[in-house]
């Protein structure tokens, strides 16, 4: 998955999580409450991969 694809997926996941949180805050019960946990973990995975790539680029540029 390319960086651009991950960024698009990240936006989609964050938007879905926002909708679920808003529905939960308004008092309605989402169809699948566990979906919030899955979304948070997916977002964290994408952010972790992005950070790992940034660190790899930094390490390539200069050696310690």
Image (cartoon, rainbow, N blue to C red):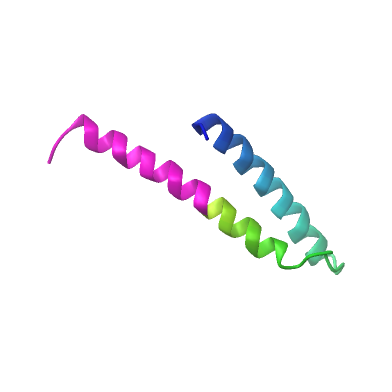
Number of numbered discs on residues: 0
Q: Measuring 44% from the left and 50% from the top, which residue is drawn there?
A: 48
Q: Main secondary structure of the magenta part?
A: helix
Left or right of 54 in this view: 30: right
* Relative height, residue 25 to residue 19 (above, below): below
| Residue drawn 17% across the image and 33% down it | 62
Q: Position of residue 3 (x, y in %)?
A: 50, 32
Residue 18 coordinates in the image, percent (x, y): 72, 53
Q: Is residue 49 magenta?
A: yes
Question: In the current view of this chain or complex, which residue is farthest to the left?
Answer: 64
Magenta residues (range)? 45-64
Q: Residue at x 55, y 30 (%)?
A: 4
Q: Where does residue 34 sit, x and y in percent of width and height? A: 71, 67
- 63 with respect to 48 (left or right): left
Is residue 6 left or right of 19 when viewed as pictured?
left
Residue 63 x %, y %: 14, 36
Look at the image and say whether residue 8 sits in the magenta stretch: no
**Residue at image point 52% right, 54% down:** 44
Quarter assignment of residue 30: bottom right
Quadrant of the image occupied by residue 17:
bottom right
In the current view of this chain or complex, which residue is farthest to the right?
28
Q: Nearer the viewer, residue 57 or 19?
A: 57
């Amino acid at each position: 998955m390319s960086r651009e694809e991950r960024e698009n997926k990240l936006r989609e996941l964050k938007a879905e999580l926002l909708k679920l949180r808003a529905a939960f805050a308004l008092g309605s019960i989402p169809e699948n409450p566990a979906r919030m946990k899955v979304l948070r973990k997916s977002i964290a995975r994408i952010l972790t991969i992005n950070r790992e790539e940034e660190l790899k680029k930094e390490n390539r540029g200069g050696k310690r």
